Image (cartoon, rainbow, N blue to C red):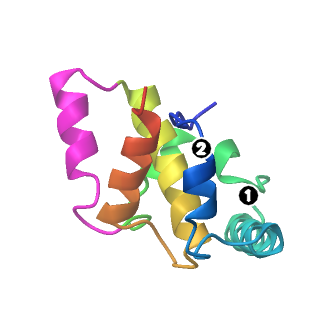
Amino acid sequence: MDIRVLVPRVTTGKMRGADGSTPTTAEARAGVAAARARMAERLRGTGWTKNAEVTGAWLRADGRIEPGSTTELDRALDLGTLTMRGWDRVMRLAWTLADLEAVDRPSGAHVRGALALRSAL
């Protein structure tokens, strides 16, 4: 599992205080379906259909991501706090975050978000 998130207990006060900004199940399903369609289109002809299936070499190829967006990952790799396998996992998740936002490739914000989701425990 590439996402690690601590989920706090929901209280009735939090549930009743919701402002309605949370997407409905149908809206979330539609967003995920659109992201999967983006993945499938981008990966057409590669033999893969999901970000989780792509190789590290594909992830690291020139021009795949915005220049400078992996600075924090690269630093963690150099310091030994992240392995190459971990780097690849974060980037797969960054691609998924970019797909959910309907953008062409991950930015630094997507990489930071993916890193946060990977290191939440």
Where in the figure is residue 63, as x and y percent of width and height?
A: 39, 68
Identify which residue, 6 or 59, lies in the foreground. 6
Identify which residue, 52 or 59, lies in the foreground. 52
Corner quadrant of residue 109: bottom left
- Residue farthest to the top? 80
Where in the figure is residue 94, as x and y percent of width and height?
A: 48, 55
Corner quadrant of residue 27: bottom right
Q: Which residue is mark 2?
A: 11
Cβ atoms at labels 2 and 1 below 8 Å apart: no
Is residue 29 depicted above or below 75 in this figure? below
78 inside magenta stretch: yes
Q: Which residue is mark 1?
A: 46
Label 2: how many Cα within 10 Å (few below 14, some 14–19, many 20+): few
Q: What residue is drawn where x is 79% and y is 75%? A: 30
Q: Which mark is residue 38?
A: none
Corner quadrant of residue 119: top left
Where in the figure is residue 110, as x and y percent of width and height?
A: 40, 61
Label 1: how many Cα within 10 Å (few below 14, some 14–19, many 20+): few
Q: What residue is drawn where x is 62% and y is 62%? A: 16
Identify which residue, 3 or 45, lies in the foreground. 3
Q: What kind of element bears circle 1?
A: loop
Q: What kind of element bears circle 2?
A: loop
87 inside magenta stretch: no
Q: For this view, does 38 lie left or right of residue 117? A: right
Residue span colored magenta: 66-82
How far is the residue under mark 2 from the one under mark 1? 46 Å
Quadrant where the image shows the C terminus: top left
Q: Amino acid at mark 2?
A: Thr
